[in-house]
Image (cartoon, helix red, strand yellow):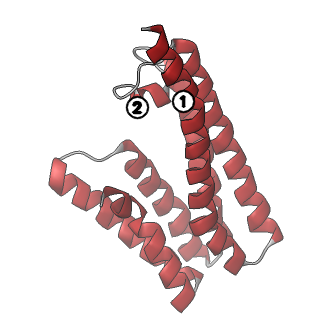
């Protein structure tokens, strides 16, 4: 259910685009993202940092899109989010307890050597950079229909594929760690 909650603004964006076009879809994703943040706040009195960053970027890029009547701005949001995440993952080890972003996210479930956490984190940095760049290629080389399909299904699919690859990589190290004990 939490996964559906995370993706509900994107799914509403997709449906609104298919029925009403990019500008209505942009207004819908702005509203849905604000509802998502509000619901999270009411339930737990906290907001996930990722939802907060996404909300700010949706408001900025979506707002400019609607204000200027230029769909290019909402398309840039995908790249902005991914490149922001790449930078965040890159600088996180320099802040606080020196753990990588990926270790902070899943380190309670897995015990891995510091070097493995660093490699995993760099893989995520590379993934976010590439995904942001691929968004620009799709944005500038294809029509808006193709971009919307990529934004919804391509980004989700590529992320799931990357998570599976990461899982396979992690299994090698989890198995090694278990054998060493």
Q: Position of residue 18 (x, y in %)?
A: 56, 86
- Quadrant (top left/top right/bottom left/bottom right) for the N terminus: bottom left
Secondary structure of the residue carrying numbered label 2:
helix
Counting labels gives 2
In the rendered image, which residue does mark 1 sit on? 170
The relative height of residue 80 versus residue 148 in the rendered view (above or below) is above
Contact between marks 2 and 1 (CB within 8 A): the answer is: no
At x 57%, y 68%, the residue is 152
Using the image as rendered, state which of residue 91 and residue 162 is in the foreground: 162
The relative height of residue 69 versus residue 39 in the rendered view (above or below) is below
Residue furthest to the front in view is 179
Q: Residues within 10 Å of mark 2 (few under 14, many from 20)?
A: few
Spatial CA span between label 2 and label 1: 12 Å
Residue 24 visible? The answer is no
Q: Position of residue 52 (x, y in %)?
A: 38, 49
- Quadrant (top left/top right/bottom left/bottom right) for the C terminus: top left
Q: Residue 73 — which label?
A: none
Q: Position of residue 165 (x, y in %)?
A: 62, 41
From the viewer's perspective, tell me whether residue 127 is left or right of residue 40: right
């Amino acid at each position: 259910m939490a996964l559906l909650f995370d993706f509900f603004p994107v799914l509403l964006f997709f449906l609104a685009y298919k029925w009403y076009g990019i500008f209505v879809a942009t207004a819908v994703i702005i509203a849905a993202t604000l509802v998502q943040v509000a619901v999270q706040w009411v339930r737990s009195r906290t907001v996930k940092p990722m939802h907060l960053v996404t909300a700010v970027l949706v408001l900025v890029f979506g707002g400019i899109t609607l204000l200027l009547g230029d769909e290019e701005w909402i398309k840039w949001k995908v790249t902005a989010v991914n490149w922001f995440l790449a930078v965040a993952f890159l600088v996180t080890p320099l802040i606080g307890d020196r753990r990588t972003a990926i270790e902070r996210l899943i380190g309670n479930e897995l015990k891995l050597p510091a070097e493995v956490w660093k490699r995993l984190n760099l893989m995520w940095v590379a993934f976010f950079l590439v995904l942001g760049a691929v968004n620009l290629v799709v944005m500038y080389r294809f029509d808006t229909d193709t971009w919307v399909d990529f934004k919804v299904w391509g980004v989700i699919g590529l992320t799931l594929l990357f998570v599976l690859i990461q899982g396979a990589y992690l299994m090698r190290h989890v198995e090694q760690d278990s054998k060493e004990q």
